[in-house]
Amino acid sequence: MSSTSDSSEPSLRRAALAVLLERDPATKAHQARHLHARTEAHELSVEPSLELDEPPGLPGRPALPHLVEPGSLRRRGMQSEAGRAALLHALAHIEFNAINLALDAIWRFASMPPGFYLDWLKVAAEEAHHFSLLSARLGEFGHVYGDFPAHDGLWEMAQRTRGDVLARMALVPRTLEARGLDASPPIRKRLAQAGDHASAAILDVILRDEIGHVLIGNRWFRFLCTRAGVDPHPTYAHLAEQYHAPKLRGPFNFEARRDAGFDEAELRALAGLAD
């Protein structure tokens, strides 16, 4: 059962769950940023010990886009506006899911230090900003979010790790989201080569912020490993196998991964995969 709150201030974690349930993407993005502003203004209490029941309907999302298997998504070149619009839509879908993932970490995992919830709220607000930038740019191509099919890989991993905060930290920010650190520079280069400097500039903002998001994931993964008295390296390998994480493939953005908190042993292992 849900615990009751003794605080006179509204609960950040309850509010995060309410935003997660919101189905309209633009409204959700606005609410995530507003929630961060309210927390920065000390209008909300964190309440780490609060235990909340999972309601139906998570995550709140619109009827579109149609969700399909990743292999059925058609690859398009960036030399055409249609191809760049499809890319922007795919990126917007990732950012929409990233809002959901950050909000889910806030409400779902009780008894973490207060900084855990504040970190993920900052992430949710920044992912909301990214989604808004991409949505606006997509509108300049005559499209809206939902116009193209998409896949649900990010949220599927959230579902698999819903009962294990250590697995969530291992396999969402520092595995799935870290892949964005690797993918972003070549995508940005192709956009610039196509003359789409406005879209390329959005990729610069996203990469800068995503380094910080993966760093947060690394920090809390290592915190949890220390708390459990386990070695992060074999623990990560075990969790990746247990929860069927995607296999890592190069090329890797070693500079960004180093900035995002991966240690030299992890980077050497990735270098071996790249070779």
Image (cartoon, rainbow, N blue to C red):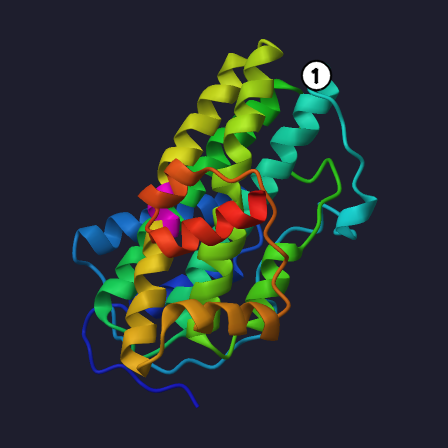
Residue type pointed to by label 1: Glu
Q: Is residue 162 visible?
A: yes
Residue 137 image-quadrant placement? top right
Q: Residues within 10 Å of mark 1 (few under 14, many from 20)?
A: some
Q: Is residue 133 left or right of residue 87?
A: left
Does the magenta stretch mainly form a helix, a strand or a loop? helix
Q: Is residue 131 left or right of residue 122?
A: right
Residue nearer the viewer, 34 or 271: 271
| Magenta extent | 210-214
Image spot of residue 253 (x, y percent): 46, 37
Which residue carries the number 1 mark? Answer: 81
Q: Is residue 45 visible?
A: no
Question: Does the magenta run of residues contain 211?
Answer: yes
Image spot of residue 261 (x, y percent): 32, 51
Q: Is 68 placed above or below 237 here?
A: above
Query: What residue is at 42 percent from the left and 55 percent from the top?
Result: 266
Q: Is residue 243 left or right of residue 104?
A: right
Query: What residue is at 45 percent from the left and 56 percent from the top?
Result: 174
Image spot of residue 84 (x, y percent): 66, 22
